[in-house]
Image (cartoon, helix red, strand yellow):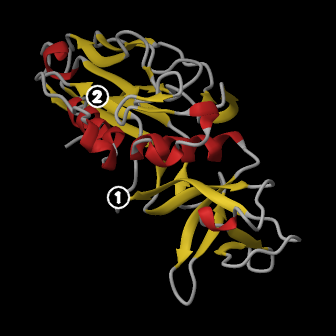
């Protein structure tokens, strides 16, 4: 058999990594992306057209936002003059928070000996770089209390829900309970399998390889400092943190990691011989704070 001849490589860089910029209204962290384009290219002389239409991301990605209307559609179209194959590969990463007990340490400058017993306080051990529980009060120490303490299950927390419609009408659907699933990975698997395969001369490629449509949403139940799920008003962002729902707490952990807040995000490091919490930041391997998608489609002629 003769070697395949490459007709043309059509590569789409859909978007670059997302980076943190700022905190919004004291609640949501914003993520800024590089500008995304829409591309199409015709592969001569076969009459094959590979195309993307629409946009997958806004300039910012944040809680309680969704993809632009219609999302991003991609596919391979036309009628080929010869037999060939389409190959699709996708590189991607997604925002997630890893397994464990997380929280945010808040310094309390108003604590007194009289008020000390009303909540659990921590002090920071600069030698070991951990927070530990402090049972006794001393006026010369700096004390911290924890907000948004929440457990993340094995497999991690994936706040962005990706959804894809393939050529057969199949969907990857995000439900509330599926935040333990990387739905971008699921969507990519559908995408790669839907835009990969061989075709015969004069076959209608739209029927085989178009269209794949991908959208996303990142939703939580906080609206105007009100947790709709638990019915809790969050006064000034403080005071009711223990009563907001777990996914809202997890989102706030991610937001603080992204925006470089002076409050320290921590993760429980050990239980014995004492409970310790270690500071985490955007470089931690316990989380990922970027989302991106890089798509490459290759059309080969087969003799």
Asked whether, in this view, residue 52 is left or right of residue 207, the answer is right
Pointers 1 and 2 in contact (CB under 8 A)?
A: no
Residue ID at (61%, 70%) = 277
Residue ID at (74%, 79%) = 128
Q: Hey, which quadrant is residue 261 in on the image? A: top right
Precedes in sequence: disc 1 or disc 2: 1
- Disc 2, SS: strand
Question: Mark 1 = which residue?
Answer: 155
State the image coordinates of residue 62 (x, y, percent, origin top left): 53, 28
State the image coordinates of residue 200 (x, y, percent, origin top left): 12, 23
Q: Does residue 52 sit above or below 258 in this rendering? A: above
Quarter that holds the N terminus = top left
Quarter that holds the C terminus = top left
Q: Does residue 233 sit above or below 76 in this rendering? A: below
Asked whether, in this view, residue 9 is left or right of residue 214, the answer is right
Residue ID at (53%, 54%) = 287
Closer to viewer: mark 1 or mark 2 = 1
Q: Which of the labelled discs sits on residue 124, or is there none?
A: none
Asked whether, in this view, residue 274 is left or right of residue 160, the answer is right
Residue 28 appears in the picture as rendered: no
Q: Nearer the viewer, residue 65 or 103?
A: 103
State the image coordinates of residue 193 (x, y, percent, origin top left): 22, 36
For the residue carrying disc 2, how many other residues have a C-alpha within 10 Å: few (<14), some (14-19), or many (20+)?
Answer: many
For the image, the number of numbered tags is: 2
Question: Mark 2 = which residue?
Answer: 163
Residue ID at (56%, 61%) = 285
């Amino acid at each position: 058999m003769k070697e395949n001849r490459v007709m043309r490589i059509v590569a789409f860089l859909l978007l670059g990594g997302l980076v943190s910029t700022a905190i919004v209204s004291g609640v949501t962290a914003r993520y800024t992306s590089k500008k995304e384009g829409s591309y199409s290219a015709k592969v001569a002389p076969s009459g094959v057209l590979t195309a993307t239409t629409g946009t997958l991301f806004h300039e910012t990605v944040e809680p309680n936002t969704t993809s632009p209307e219609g999302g991003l559609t991609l596919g391979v179209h036309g009628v080929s003059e010869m037999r060939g194959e389409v190959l699709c590969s996708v590189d991607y990463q997604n925002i997630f928070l890893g397994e464990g007990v997380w929280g945010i340490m808040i310094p309390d400058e108003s604590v007194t000996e009289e008020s000390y017993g009303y909540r659990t306080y921590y002090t920071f051990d600069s030698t070991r770089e951990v927070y530990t529980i402090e049972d006794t009060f001393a006026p010369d120490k700096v004390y911290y209390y924890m907000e948004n303490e929440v457990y993340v299950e094995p497999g991690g927390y994936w706040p962005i829900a990706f959804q894809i419609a393939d050529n057969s009408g199949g969907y990857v659907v995000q439900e509330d309970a599926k935040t333990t699933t990387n739905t971008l990975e699921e969507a990519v698997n559908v995408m790669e399998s839907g835009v990969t395969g061989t075709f015969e001369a004069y076959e209608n490629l739209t029927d085989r390889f178009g269209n794949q449509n991908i959208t996303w949403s990142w939703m939580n139940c906080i609206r105007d400092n009100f947790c709709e799920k638990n019915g809790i008003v969050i006064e000034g962002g403080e005071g009711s943190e223990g009563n907001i729902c777990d996914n809202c707490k997890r989102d706030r952990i991610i937001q603080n990691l992204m925006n470089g807040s002076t409050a320290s995000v921590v993760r429980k490091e050990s239980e014995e011989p004492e409970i310790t919490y270690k500071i985490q930041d955007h470089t931690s391997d316990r989380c990922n704070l970027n989302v991106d998608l890089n798509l490459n489609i290759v059309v080969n002629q087969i003799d």
